[in-house]
Amino acid sequence: MVAADVGFAEASWIMVVKSLVIFAVILGLVPMILLLERKLLGRFQARYGPNRVGPKGLLQPLADVVKLLSKEAYKPDAAVPILWAIAPALVILSATATLAIIPFGDVADGNVGLYGIDVSIGILYAFAFGSISFYGLLLGGWSSGSKYSFMGAMRSAAQLISYEISMGLALLGVIMMAGSLSLVDIANAQADTIWYVIPQFVGFLIFMVAGFAETNRPPFDLPEADAELVAGYNTEYGGMRFGSYFMAEYMEMVVVSGIAAAMFLGGWHGPGPDWLGPIWMLAKIMVLICLFIWVRATLPRLRYDQLMSLGWKVLLPLATLNVLVTAVLVVVT
Amino acid sequence: MPDAPGLELIAHEINSRHEGAIVGTAFEHGQAVLLADPGLIRETLGFLRDEPAHAYRFLASVHGADYLPAAPRFAVHYELLNMPRVERLRVKALLADPGDDGLPELDSVVDLFPTADFQEREAHDFFGIVFRGHPDLRRILMPEDYVGWPQRRDFPIGGEPVIFTATEDTVPGWTR
Amino acid sequence: MNPTTRAPDYADTVRTPEELGRDAIGRTEAQVIGTSPIERTAIEREEELFTINMGPHHPATHGVLRLLVSLEGEVVRDLKPVMGYVHTGIEKSCEDKSYWKAIPFIERMDYLAYYSNMAAFCGAAETLLDLEIPPRAAWLRILHLELNRIHSHLVGLGTSALDLGAISMFWYCFRERDTILDLFEMSSGQRMHTRYFQVGGVAEDIPVGFARKVREFCALMPGRIAEYEALLDHNEIFLQRMKDVGIVPRERLLELGVTGPLLRAAGEPWDLRKVEHALPYADFEFDVPIGTVGDNWDRYRVRLAEMRESVRIIEQAVDGLPEGSWIADERHVVLPPRHELATSMEALIQHFKLVTEGFRVPPGEAYFPVEGPRGEYGVFLVADGSAKPARVHMRDPSFVNLQALREMCVGGYVADLIANLAMLDPILGGIDR
């Protein structure tokens, strides 16, 4: 049994530098994921994708961001001013905060941990901030004063409740096997044995399905269903406020992929020397993100009632069963 | 299509049931036309629909027309279809122009043929024909506050002012 | 899980103009102040209803259709289509054009079924002229009508899948659509709105190499359809979204005047290609696919099967294309051949007269129906003896079929509304004309 080393503390300046580096890397990663998604979608759909801005379209995300930044900060008359402005900030805040617990490696050279923080409550921290991000969607949708946004907000609230539970239960099996909530410990626990994706395959599937729902990605993009609700909760947003929602969605993709990589795919562990650890972690994250994109290119959207029945009637019983079986096995062995 | 003698038989049959419902027949280019009395149009169409020997149960199209120099100026055509026999029959109701600001009136057949709903609204919209008893007789393609009946032959082509945002307050009835 | 729809009893809803409170020119209060009855009933009857205004600018309304939808949560309780946003008065404008100049107008009504529009209009004019088109022209018309049907179904399928969230289908469908547009460009010089059909036949013979390209397309298309099926038919989400959704009984569809794939999906084997003999479809071997229950799944399957059948017809048309003239030899209607203009004074005068004044059509009226991708395209044409039609009316299937939307949607979810609308496949250019 391993336990989070709560006694370990770094110098404050290291923590500051570390958070800056992680933030910079992820913030740099998001536009790259954006470009990757558009390029990949293009290939999936028998077309080129962006290829005009910069060499091979590499500067397209930059152009997008500049466009969003230069747009007028428009606010509809019916919107509730403060909430309307806070909502996108909440979403991006929670996504950034959750990033802190994604580990890219263990403690290197005895004094720098390659992660934001290694809290003992680990994954619960991620859930806590994940819930806050839904406040962002809910408040944004409600305070927009638009009926479409309102429906999107209601859908996102229902989706949160339905899928958060399954997601937590799906991870419980891993937590029981590793005996720790800390992502660093869970990743370390997979170093010498097989990755948890094999014994906890059901848990992995449930986590990924629920992860798609948590990030509002297709086929669970009901809160923003562009065909029915015309982008749902962010119908009325424009400029960088819309950009925040957009960025946050991709950061949440990174977070979900990161948690999945750390908990099921062995984290930074992989063949090769130790310094390859962070690269392994990034590679695993990118593979999972490609899965997100692939699914988006393939699957149609679920209907509201189908989403609910999938969450409550399939995922939840399955996740519970998974926890029970794992618990019995853990106790027996 | 019923052939020319068959058309006469149908006309005779309807007239024996509803006196004066059919005022004439025409058979041109292989298409059979019954000229119906507009006052008895519901009886005529109902008969053609319900009589088992005819059973024109499908109303393919309803459209208005304006034969301006002619005396009964307007007409409403009902393109009936018997699907099993693949027979088409056009019932044409000629409507006189009441003059001044009056509108020609005709009974609605929406309860007999629900498909006539939109199409009667369209005929109303373009020719100003009032279908009595239509459940929701409003303009359908022109703006709801439009004045005039644009497909009448005496309605000029062109000259329709184009409304832009900058000039919308010049439109009568404009409210913010 | 799917609340069933109760067909409204029309007898209950019929009211006299007095009851409706009409003014002197037949306008209701609703017309004057610009609210619709649906809004008022929502206020009076059920305060819990949530009325949203879908469109005219909405990504899933396939144009500028506006739907006033009363929702109870996510369930549609009432729906009223409002249209006319792209009404451009084409029927009226046609009255100001000579017959052969009206053809480009007619094409632009249903902008995905331009060949059907043209075929109906030219057919009506030919009926009035008692003009027989030569066999080669008829076969070329069939060839293009069927290409057009595939084209229209591809756009319909792609946008429907897009509405359901399967974004990639859109691109696959448009890839094949583009090859069809290339064929149109080859035969007529235009990709859309080709004005290829001419009163008396077709405008021009097909160019060298067209037949080969068509055969290539026919060899390609069934495989592509199989790809679509592979992507959608076994997709559990797609199946759940389509099956048992938007069912309207066959009898009700007939009452509502619905034609085309919608009607066939409900099990009624009604196809004008099989029963009307204005075009020699009888010389072709093809089946009319029909559905069983008439849900969205059947509608989708019927359209896919129709594409396959159309490929069969196209193959037969290009293989058995009769030799001969592609346009009737009626010099008072059709333009003289180009080469005669340099040598024959009479031909030049004829050409000048036809281009400037156009041909005259004897007085009369005719209704000419054609089976298009969405159902019965019927042109009602009144001629007054001059060179311009006195009345052109297009019985557009989208316009008539739209009446079934309410019954397809009421009691279902708002997401099903989108699916129903996509499967209804209305073209607003045709509805508004």
Image (cartoon, coloured by chain):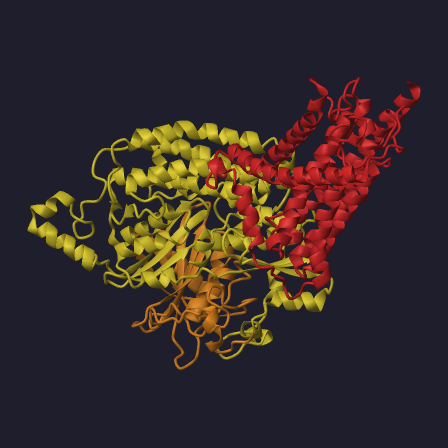
Chain colours: A red, B orange, C yellow
Quarter of the image for residue A254 reads top right
Give percent across and percent down for residue A183: 80, 31
Decide which of A305, C79 is in the foreground and name it: A305
Side of A124 relative to C392 (left or right): right
From this view, report whether residue A278 is shown above or below residue C94: above
* Residue drawn at the location 70% of the way across and 33% of the way down: A257
* Residue drawn at the location 53% of the way across and 68% of the way down: B137
Task: Evaluate whether residue C324 shows in this view.
Answer: yes
Decide which of A332, C154 is in the foreground and name it: A332
Residue lying farthest to the right in this orientation: A331
From this view, report whether residue B82 is shown above or below residue A28: below
* Residue drawn at the location 40% of the way across and 82% of the way down: B100
Task: Evaluate whether residue C290 shows in this view.
Answer: no
Give percent across and percent down for residue C77: 67, 57
Quadrant for the C terminus of chain B in the image: bottom right
From this view, report whether residue B14 is shown above or below residue A224: below
